[in-house]
Amino acid sequence: MDFDFLTYLFFGGLTRGSIYALIALGYTMVYGIVELINFAHGEIYMIGAFTGLIISSVLTMLGLPILAIVVLSALTAIIYSCAYGYTMEKIAYKPLRDSNAPRLSALISAIGMSLFLQNYVLLAQTSDFLPFPNFIPDFEFWEPYAHILTSPELVILITTVIVMICLTILIKFTKIGKAMRATSQDKVMAVLMGVNINRVISITFIVGSATAAIGGILIACHIGQINFYMGFTAGIKAFVAAVLGGIGSIPGAVLGSFVLGLTESFFAGYFSSDYEDVFAFLFLVLILIFRPSGILGRAETKKV
Amino acid sequence: MLKLKNIQTFYGNIQVLKDINMEVKQGEIITLIGANGAGKSTILMTISGIVPPRKGDILFQGNPIQNINPDKIVALGISQVPEGRRIFPYLTVMENLDMGTFLRNDVFEIKKDMDYVFQLFPILSERRNQPGGTLSGGEQQMLAISRAIMARPKLLLLDEPSLGLAPIITTQIFNIIKKINRENNTTIFLVEQNASLALKVADRGYVMETGEIIMTDTGDNLFNNKDVKKAYLGI
Ligand SMILES: Nc1ncnc2c1ncn2[C@@H]1O[C@H](COP(=O)(O)OP(=O)(O)O)[C@@H](O)[C@H]1O
Ligand SMILES: [Mg+2]
């Protein structure tokens, strides 16, 4: 067996997994707090990529240095996506929550929001694939390893690790992070501690949108093109990864994403890339048969 | 300190509280006793703003609070230890206590209060890094009370703290409740099914039946009342 090919597939899988993880975090965090599958989450990722493209084109025309372009457009894209995530929750989900609507209504509202955002970008922008500038240069020092892991892939991996560390600190050690965990475990009790649930929910949507936007920009740089539909496929895959790892669990979403990314990469490399999606879903079904609540999911405990 | 005036609370169309009038004075321990399903927990949830009343007024230190959000009510100084303790099962003991200080920023005072609850319940200090869900029932009750007093409430609502506990633990917990009342001048509103114990620690008591207050008197008088004895003390 060719060892280089194996490592190439391994890192390719990790890269894919990283992108899935950046999106899956949003699904799993929102589910953990409001028990809602936010089907429009993939669209936030797409909006992140589009905003990055628009801002960077403008800045390029203005003739700014490349580093300034990258930082400014990434920041704008993140902020813009966060604003979308925040507004989406206020428009599509909060009114339903306030009126105690059944869960199915929220799900339909989510699907509606997803279709609306896709078509909005389709009409406001274009249905074509747009070329995305490659902001990540081929690093010279990385040259010897570039045949197993390209520079953009390296950047994706490192960025993902940094995001995970920041998120872990946020969730584990900050006041708001503790409030998020408490809310996901017992909402009424969290309120009785003085937690403003609506604020926790908004912050959850904002954090999830930020990581998705980072994923959107990274993948756009890596693949070199974007279109309005990109959030749909990636969103479904990330959702699968979140369920695989155990929806509601943050480490689960990350683990599920890497498992899915690696599985797809190895299957595509050794068998056929035509059937990698089929295989990915088959794998999901198999895992869920043996572990219905996902790899790290907690078995449903009925609260008294 | 707290006044309930003609409170009516509903779950959907079902009226659970019918015209409740109560008063709690600063520094008192009052108890509310009554059979299962009478509406005792609903009164506490109504005060905390989780199930707001449809009619009536709740005055806390003279100001109406019946239309205020539950998190703001905590900020005003009313904390509740709900029925069943509701410890956050996957947060550690320390993190559960931290949640009690959610609205506070006075780091040094928080540290002092932390030492105070560890002194009240040394077992919590030993278990500080254990997830709350792994504690025994008695330990969870200790944690629930500690978590509530970490908020430094002016008024502490306790819903059946003796539920499911061994008599020895119950006695210990009741002693601590008296101690908290004495040492911090915390006003205590105690809901209990264990009427004999509750009436012994309370200054005054209310007796409740199917959504209404049917009797109120000092703890001693209720304890010696023959109707109360027959219905709630099993004597
Ligand atoms: N969330 C709820 N929805 C509907 N009915 C409820 C709810 N909680 C309590 N009840 C009903 O309200 C009544 C009073 O309950 P509760 O206040 O828990 O009584 P207690 O604490 O005295 O045992 C009971 O008949 C109970 O079935
Ligand atoms: Mg009750």
Image (tube, rainbow, N blue to C red):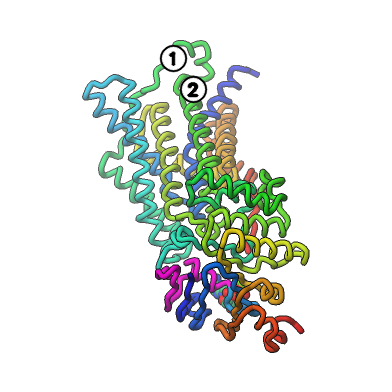
Tell me if mark 1 has few (under 14), some (14-19) or many (20+) residues whose alpha carbon lies within 10 angstroms of its own.
few
Q: CA distance from mark 1 to mark 2?
A: 10 Å
The amino acid sitting under disc 1 is: Phe
Q: Position of residue A70 (x, y in %)?
A: 34, 25
Chain identity of mark 2: A
Image position of A282 with respect to A49: above or below: below
Tell me residue A64's x, y (percent): 26, 21
Q: Position of residue B35 (x, y in %)?
A: 65, 79
Q: Secondary structure at mark 1?
A: loop
Instruction: Looking at the picture, tell me which residue is in the foreground, B112 or A224.
Output: B112
The residue positioned 45% from the left and 55% from the top of the image is A196
Tell me if A84 is positioned left or right of B194 in this view: left
Q: Earlier in the sequence, mark 1 or mark 2?
A: 1
Q: Secondary structure at mark 2?
A: helix
Determine whether label 1 and label 2 are within 8 Å by CB: yes
Please tell me the numbered disc located at residue B140: none
Residue lying at 68% horizontally and 88% vertically, measured from the top left: B227
Q: Which residue is mark 1?
A: A139
What chain does badge 1 belong to?
A: A
Disc assigned to residue A154: 2
User: Relative to residue A136, is residue B122 drawn left or right?
Assistant: right
Which residue is at a point 38% across and 41% down the rendered structure image? A229
Instruction: Give the amino acid type for the residue marked by disc 2 in the picture.
Output: Leu
Span of residues in magenta? B41-66
Q: Is residue B190 magenta?
A: no
